[in-house]
Image (spheres, helix red, strand yellow):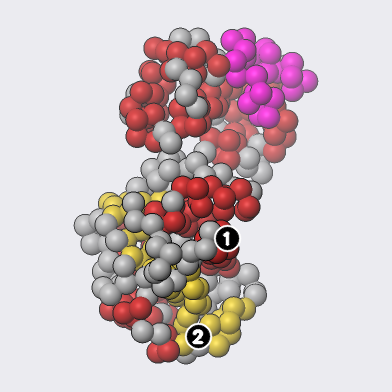
Amino acid sequence: MTLLSPLAQPRTLVFLTYPQMGLLDLTGAQTVFWAATKAMAERGLQGYVLHNASLAGGLMSTAEGLSVDTVALAQLDPATIDTLVVPGAPAIEQAMLDNTALVDWLRNASGQARRTASVCSGTFLLALAGLLEGRRAATHWAMCELLKQRFPSIEVDVDAIFVQQGQVWTSAGVSAGIDLALALVEADCGREVALQVARELVVFLKRPGGQAQFSQVLQAQTADSAGFDALHAWISDNLRDSDLSVERLAAQSHMSPRNFARVYKQKTGRTPAKAIELFRMEAARRMLEDSQRSIEQIAGLCGFGDEERMRCTFHRHLAISPRDYRERFSR
C-alpha cells in the first residue's frame, strides 16, 4: 500500500460535473476526501485538493435542483491530476448524448491521471470513453441490464459495491460512492485514517468490493410490504429462534396463519419460509465479514441449526460456501 508522504504534494482530485448529474453521487464521495484531508492534516501530512470541474466552468445544476460551482477544465493540467471521479445521473442515457465533449476530455485525461473512478451510472460515461473495454465493472443494480446491452464487452458485476480493475474503479448506486471513496482513502492514507473518516461520517468501513449491493433487508422495505416492517425488524432480532414458523409469524402479525401466508406472499413476492432463509443468510454474511466467530457458531446464532444447512443455503443463493465467502470478503 502506498501511503501519502509528509513531503508529498497534496493529491489533486477532479470531479467531472455536467448538467443534471446526481447530487449525492458527487457530494458523498467528495465529503469522504474532505474528511480524509482533515485527518491527514492532524497528522501533519498532506491530503487532497478537490476541484469540481466542467467544460465551461460556472454553476452546474444537479438533478435535485441545487447548483455546484465549477472551474473550467481548460484551467486544469491533466498531468497534475491524481484521480478523476465521474458522478452518475438519473437520466444517464440523455447525459451520454449531451456530454460527448466531456467524454472526449475524459478519454484523453484518464491516460495521464493515476486512476479514474465512477459513482453509480457514471460507469456509463467511463464505458463511452472506452475505459472499460473487456473489464469488470459495477453500476446501480437497476441499470446493470442497460449497461450490458449498451456495452456488451464489459463484464457487469451485478452484486458489487465497487470494482477495481487496474487504475479504473467503478461503484454501484449513489451511496456506494462513499464506500468507493473510503477504499481509495484507505489505499492512499492507510486504514487508520479511513476508519477515522468513517467514524466522523457515521458510516461503516466494512462493505468490501464484491459484497452484494441489493440486500434482502432493503428489498423487504418496499411500499407494498410496509405493513410487515415491524415483523421484519422482529425477525432480524430473533433469527436464533428455531421456531419461526408461519404460525409464530402470523401470531406476531396478529393474523390467522392462512391469511398471513397469503398476504405475505402477495405483498413481498416470497413465502415466509423463503424470507426467513434469506434474512438468516444475510445475518450470516455480516458475521462472516465482521466477526471472528467460527462458522459453526454463526450457523447457530443465525438459526440455521448446523453448519451444513447454512452451507447449502449459501451455495443455493450465492454459489459459494460460507468458508470461501469469509476468505473473499472478511476484513
Stretch of the chain drawn in magenta: 232-255
Residue located 28% across and 78% down the image: 108
Identity of the amino acid at label 1? Answer: Glu
Tell me: 79 left or right of 5: left
For disc 1, the marked residue is 42
Along the line of sight, the residue nearer the viewer: 266 or 91: 91
Along the line of sight, the residue nearer the viewer: 73 or 83: 83
The vertical placement of 135 against 311, above or below, is: below
Badge 1 crowding class, 10 Å Cα cut-off, few under 14, some 14 to 19, many 20 or more, is: few
For disc 2, the marked residue is 71
- For label 2, the SS is strand
Instruction: Locate residue 181, reporting x and y percent.
Output: 47, 57
- For label 1, the SS is helix
Q: Magenta stretch containing residue 251, yes or no?
A: yes
Q: Quadrant of residue 171?
A: bottom left
Question: Which mark is drawn over residue 230?
Answer: none
Badge 2 crowding class, 10 Å Cα cut-off, few under 14, some 14 to 19, many 20 or more, is: some
Along the line of sight, the residue nearer the viewer: 32 or 70: 32
Residue located 34% across and 51% down the image: 1
Instruction: Locate residue 161, reporting x and y percent.
Output: 44, 48
Identity of the amino acid at label 2? Answer: Val
Q: Earlier in the sequence, mark 1 or mark 2?
A: 1
